[in-house]
Amino acid sequence: MSLPRHPFASTASLEQGFADGLAALLEKHSGLGVYILVLANAAYDARLWALLAPALSARHAEHAAALTAALRHGRKLSEPDDDVLVFLKLHAIGFARLGTMENRRTGPWEVMFNPLRALRPPRISGMEFDSLQRPFDAAGFHFNKPFLAKEIFWEGKLAGRPARILYNKFPFARLHGLLAPEPLRQAPQFLAPELHGWAWDVCAQSGVPGLCLGYNSYGAGASVNHLHFQSFVQAQPLPLQHACFTHNGGDKPYPLPCRRFTDPTDAWRELDRLHRQNTPYNLVYSQACLHLVARVPQDSEKLSVQSAGYGWSEMAGAVTLFSREAFEGLSEAGFEAELAAFAP
């Protein structure tokens, strides 16, 4: 794979490198995991879908034939169980019925329909919350696993530190990556002041307008206990970033407490306070500021089964739904009530 010299040097290089990397993955690797990753990324972006759909359709047929033959003859499957289950669900839907992500607005909120993301296997995002910090588990899932090497989009030095960007296997944002700073340190998903400052610098130094980094603390939607941010690019501001809301200087209250910081030191003081109080939180770093939402843990009795898994995207006003009925039925007031339930 030809990797860009710098991932966030320009929008054009990021878009081209992202697309080229997905095409190369599909061409060079025949496994189910790569197929699912490329399919999910293509389904999120109509331009990627137009580029990759023919090759994806052919690969889908190959996997369907191979799995059918193996199951009919009682042969042991070589692919991971998670990937087999996801593919069997995809095959039940039918490739011809798979479509790209749909979205609409209800009031200021962005609502997306992405049934593919519903197939994502649960990791720690569905576990009970006890503490913001858990020890790194080398035996668990993390970004240094050898089988993930092929899913690396870019690695090198970024804002003065070694970093790695992997494709997100089940994306829910544009040009969505998993950004792991100093991955070989094997730090858990617990933010330290120097890496808070690093994330701030990554956005500030970026040549990509709309670049943001999302962060889920443990207990606030984090699904991998290996320190990482989620990189993505917004063509338009997230609802959380709209000028109409009081935390941005407007007069419209946000459904739950949100703070906006333009100074990284001030932001860290608040993060440190939340750490000492063991309060989960979600962050969105952008090129101008940081938005911080402190919230109840994901296992709180205040939350519905559907909203318990909400992370930085939903706290920022962009919710992904998995059924057309839910997508078409969610109202402005209904989503605001869901967000309000997260107030600590």
Image: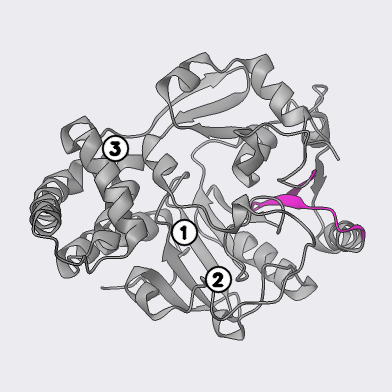
Q: Is residue 254 above or below residue 263?
A: above
Residue at the disc numbered 3 = 46
Q: Are marks 1 and 3 in contact (CB under 8 Å)?
A: no
Is the residue marked by circle 1 packed among few (<14), some (14-19), or many (20+) residues within 10 Å? many
Residue 63 at x, y = what percent?
A: 14, 55
Residue drawn 61% across the image and 60% down it: 203
Is the residue marked by circle 2 packed among few (<14), some (14-19), or many (20+) residues within 10 Å? many
Q: Is residue 284 magenta?
A: yes
Residue drawn 41% across the image and 35% down it: 114
Quadrant the C terminus occupies: top right
Q: Amino acid at mark 2?
A: Ala
Q: Which mark is residue 177?
A: 1
Residue at the disc numbered 2 = 180
Q: Is residue 324 magenta?
A: no
Q: Amino acid at mark 1?
A: Gly
| N-terminal label among 3 and 2 | 3
Query: Considering the numbered disc 3 on the image, is that residue within a helix, a strand or a loop?
Result: helix
Residue 293 at x, y = what percent?
A: 77, 44
Q: Amino acid at mark 3?
A: Ala
Residue 330 at x, y = what percent?
A: 56, 18
Read off the magenta span. Answer: 277-296
- In the drawing, does residue 150 fall left or right of residue 187? left
Residue drawn 14% across the image and 65% down it: 75
